[in-house]
Amino acid sequence: DVKVTQSSRYLVKRTGEKVFLECVQDMDHENMFWYRQDPGLGLRLIYFSYDVKMKEKGDIPEGYSVSREKKERFSLILESASTNQTSMYLCASILERGQVKQPQHFGDGTRLSIL
Amino acid sequence: SQKIEQNSEALNIQEGKTATLTCNYTNYSPAYLQWYRQDPGRGPVFLLLIRENEKEKRKERLKVTFDTTLKQSLFHITASQPADSATYLCVLYGQNFVFGPGTRLSVLP
């Protein structure tokens, strides 16, 4: 089974801090995604990556950056955390973008609170 | 702009009945549609996929229909059980994945 591991389940940070969220997958998937999930809004795509050192902006990239130095690891960075970035953050991976039958595999999320 | 709606935020049904969840979308022509289940404090888990040229897909007690004319998908759980209680997400894929807000299903014993 594919395993997507997010480094923290809960995280509390202060406004203005630089925050790192880490995600690791163990199945050699090319594509990785970062979403945030807020009540009533569904999951919204922040950034995704097709390959090592490749990144693409999603629907809400403002205030975030990402890093993919190794295939299995995709990091989300909040450059200067703000209270409106309090949310559940979910990482996902997929084998290959062109393989339409492949589902996304999600981690269990990081619930981030910015005080 | 693209929009996905799921029929209601919450749905309560009695154990043994069929649960029907609705996903409607506008301004979008997805190549396929997926349904995921999400339990509290966990990430979504994939359940079923249906392509634009397919009318219906089944997996055990689950059935999904896809009507591209109505721009609607229906997700059915037959003989529902309390263990089916969760939030169900509709996800469309065209250029990227677009998620609906989810429906929280509660199956009452």
Image: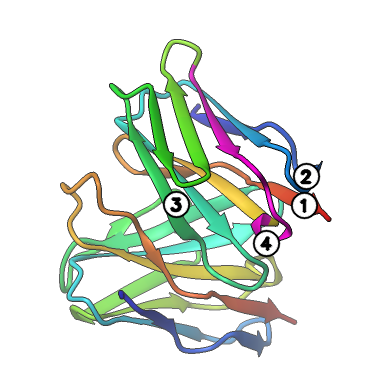
Residue A62 seen in this snapshot = no
Q: Which residue is mark 4?
A: B83
Q: Is residue B95 left or right of residue A88?
A: left
Labels 2 and 1 share a subunit: yes
Instruction: Check residue B75 for magenta coloring.
Output: yes
**x and y percent of residue A18 in the render?**
52, 85
Quick one: label 3 or label 1, which is nearer the N terminus?
A: 3
Question: What's the distance in space between the residues labelled 3 and 2, CA to CA?
Answer: 19 Å
What residue span does the magenta drawing correspond to?
Answer: B71-84
Quick one: label 1 or label 4, which is nearer the N terminus?
A: 4
Question: What's the distance in space between the residues labelled 3 and 1, CA to CA?
Answer: 18 Å
**x and y percent of residue A70 in the render?**
19, 83
Question: What's the distance in space between the residues labelled 1 and 4, CA to CA?
Answer: 9 Å
* Closer to the camera in the image, A38 or A18: A38
Q: Residue at x 18, y 66 (%)?
A: A30
Question: What's the distance in space between the residues labelled 3 and 4, CA to CA?
Answer: 15 Å
Near mark 4 (Cα within 10 A), the count class, few <14, some 14-19 or many ≥20, is few
Which chain does the residue under circle 1 lie in? B
Which chain does the residue under circle 3 lie in? B
Question: What's the distance in space between the residues labelled 2 and 1, CA to CA?
Answer: 8 Å
Q: Are marks 1 and 4 in contact (CB under 8 Å)?
A: no
Q: Which residue is mark 1?
A: B106
Q: Secondary structure at mark 4?
A: helix
Q: Residue at x 26, y 53 (%)?
A: A102
**Amino acid type, residue under disc 4 in the picture:** Ala
Q: Is residue A22 left or right of residue B54?
A: right
**Amino acid type, residue under disc 1 in the picture:** Ser
Quick one: label 2 or label 1, which is nearer the N terminus?
A: 2
Q: Which quarter of the figure is the C terminus of chain B placed in?
A: bottom right
